[in-house]
Image (tube, grey):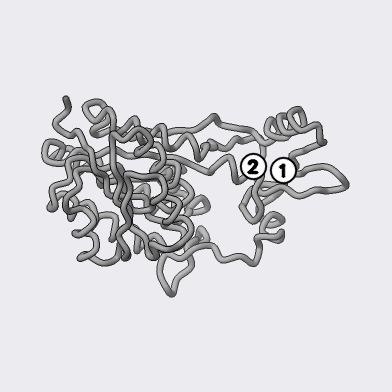
Amino acid sequence: MSSHATSKIFMIGATGAQGIPVTRSLVADGKYSVRFLTRDATGARARALLELGNTSALEGTFTDETILREGFRGCDGAFINIDGFNTGEKTEMYWAIRAYEIAMEEGIRFLVYGNLDYGLKKAGYDSRYRVGHYDGKGRVAEWILLQNQSNAERMGAAIFTSGPYIEMTISPLTPMAPTVEEGVVTWRVPLGGGAVPHVSLEDCGYYVRWLFDNTDRSNGMDLEVAIDHIPYSELARAFEKVTGHPAQYIDTDVDTYWQGPLGGSPIGRPDITRPRMTPAP
C-alpha cells in the first residue's frame, strides 16, 4: 500500500460545479470521508453534500489560516480547487500556496490541486491570450510540482487540470452559450478552425478519485483531462443529429463577440483595483 494512502479528505471548493461530483465520487462507497469548507453550512449545496453521508461541513473561508488549520487537522488528504474567477488570480495564488504549506505542516499525506491550463505560457507568453483565472492556477500548479520534487515523501501531490465544461455549451450566460436565430441553434464564438478541450463535470469525480486511489502512480503527476478537442462545427452537427433540431457554428471575430450578450459582464478580479485581462502592448 502507498505511504500516501488517505481516508479523510479536506476539500476547498466542494460546493462548486466541479466539487460536487468530486465529493460524490469520493464518498460513494465509503472508502473516503470528506470534510468540506463552506461559508454557509445551511446553504442548498452544502446540505446536498451532507445528505450524501460520510461528509461534514466546516464553516469559514480559505483566506483564514485558523480555518485552514482546523480543516486540514485530522485529515490525511486534501483537494483544493479555489474559484479564481471570483477571488482573482492574486488571491488564489497566495492562498493556494499558503494552503499547501499549512497542509504540509498539519500532516496531510496527499494533496490534489484543481488546476486550469497556464494559457499565457502555452501561448508563448503572448498577452493577447492572458486569462487571469487560468494563469493564476497554472502558476500555482507548476510551483506545487516543483515543491513536490523535495517534499514528495512527506506529502505527495498531484495536479488535476481540467478545462471548459461541456455543460457550458448548452447553458445560459456562459461564454459559449448558443442562441436561436431564425429557428436554428447557433454558436457564435471566435474559434476559427480551432477546437476546445471540453471536460464533463461528471467525469471530474472519476479522475480525482483515481488520483487518490493510486497515489503511488499519481504522486507528482499533472493529470490533464478532456473529453476531446471539440471543433464547434462538429458540436453543431452532433447537436442536430441527437436532437433533430437544426444547428450551426458561425465563426466570429473577437470584437464582435464582445459586443454580444456577455459584453457588459464582469470578467473576474485579479485584485480590487486592476482589470484581470491586460491588452498586449
Q: Nearer the viewer, residue 129 or 208?
A: 208
Rendering coords of residue 273 (x, y %): 44, 74
Question: Do residues under tags 2 and 1 come within 8 Å of each other at their CB atoms?
Answer: yes
Q: Which residue is mark 1?
A: 251
Question: Between 202 and 180, which is closer to the camera in this rendering?
Answer: 202
Which of the image's four quarters has the N terminus?
A: top left
Residue 141 visible within the image: no
Asked which secondary structure carries label 1, the reply is strand
Could you tell whether 103 is left or right of 45 in the image?
left
Of mark 2 and mark 1, the one earlier in the sequence is 2
Instruction: Relative to 60, say whether 57 is above or below.
Output: above
At 80% from the left and 48% from the top, the residue drawn is 180
Tag 2, which secondary structure?
A: loop
Q: Is residue 261 above or below residue 149?
A: below
Residue 48: give x, y in percent of width and height: 45, 51
Q: Indicate left or right for 229 with 161 as reference.
A: right
Q: CA distance from mark 2 to mark 1?
A: 6 Å
Q: Residues within 10 Å of mark 1 (few under 14, many from 20)?
A: some
User: What numbered label is drawn on residue 191?
Assistant: 2
* Picture quadrant of residue 77: top left
At a point 76% along the width and 50% down the height, the residue shown is 179
